[in-house]
Amino acid sequence: MITFLFAASVVLVTVLLVFELWQGSVLARHKFGFNFFHTSVWDPIFEQFGALPFIYGTLVTAAVALLIAVPLGIGAAIFLAELAPARVSDTLEFFIDLLAAVPSVIYGVLGVFIIVPLMRQYVHPALKHSLGFLPLFQGPAYGVGFLTAGIVLAIMVIPYIISVSREVLLSVPRDQREAALSLGATRWESTWKVVVPFARAGIFGSIFLALARALGETMAVTMVIGNTPTISASLLSPGYSIAAVIANEFTEATGELHTQSLIELGLVLFILTFLLNGFARLLIVATSKRGSGARA
């Protein structure tokens, strides 16, 4: 009974949160409708608000983060689960869990004092020199921007991908590995052709969990993205994210419409992260049940 009450309280809190966000953004939804999502003007003085620059910045930085974090995270998880000695794997997993627990503002400080200067002095000029013919790498070298925010986010979400993917890989029944090895497969062939396909759904779940974390990250992104509500094809340009604009403007909102527009952005972000987290959990549970069924 007690566990049921706790579970019901979680559902109740979620429903109340959605209700408050929905009610708190009524004025903005009535005034702008769907135009809110595809207009790029954000002008508190004339009370014109469009979410497109923030949605764009959120998606671009999350995409950059995943492009960096997914191959590194999954590769590290495969090494820890399948190749590394148990003592090495457990030790590294301990430090990876510590990295996942580091406050995001620390990553933001790391970004401001280390990554931003490196990007401005070395990475941006090198990218413009070698790949400047591409729109993705054109524009002034500010140091802050989509690419910098994506790199910081990648550093933050890699521990999540490693931890979840490692647990999913370890849930694959030993019989699957032994059957492949008994047929003459090498250790690598057994891992790549048997273990990874078996755990594919759970690995995708870890990626979606990382995506949800990247979409909702606030402080670290706010410190390195540049906080400029523009849409640019260049990854070197400053931008803005949903979480960053809420953090920067909510306490200083100049009017009711401004406040409710920020709340509507919060509602959009909540729905995105809620759906991604739910989908990721379903994939991970499906993989775990599949492993349990195979053992039985």
Image (cartoon, rainbow, N blue to C red):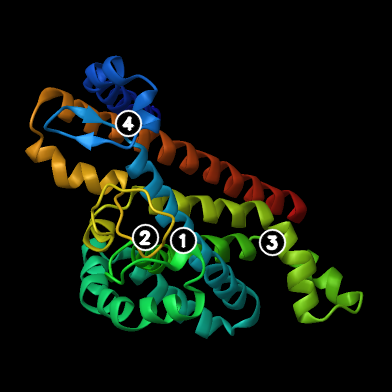
How far apart are the alpha carbons under marks 4 and 2? 23 Å
- Quick check: can you spot residue 3? no
Disc 1 versus disc 4: nearer the observer = 1
Q: Which residue is mark 2?
A: 146
**Residue type at the position of mark 4:** Leu
Does label 1 or label 2 sit earlier along the sequence?
1
Residue of label 1: 64
- Please tell me whether mark 2 or mark 3 is closer to you in this view: 2
x 25%, y 31%: residue: 49
Q: Which residue is mark 4?
A: 267
* Callout in the foreground (3, 4): 4
Who comes first in sequence, dot 2 or dot 3? 2
Q: Is disc 3 placed on a helix, strand or loop?
A: loop
Residue 67 appears in the rendering: yes
Which class describes the residues within 10 Å of circle 4: few (<14), some (14-19), or many (20+)?
A: some
Which amino acid type is shown beneath numbered disc 1? Val
The answer to whether 165 is drawn above or below residue 262 in the figure is: below
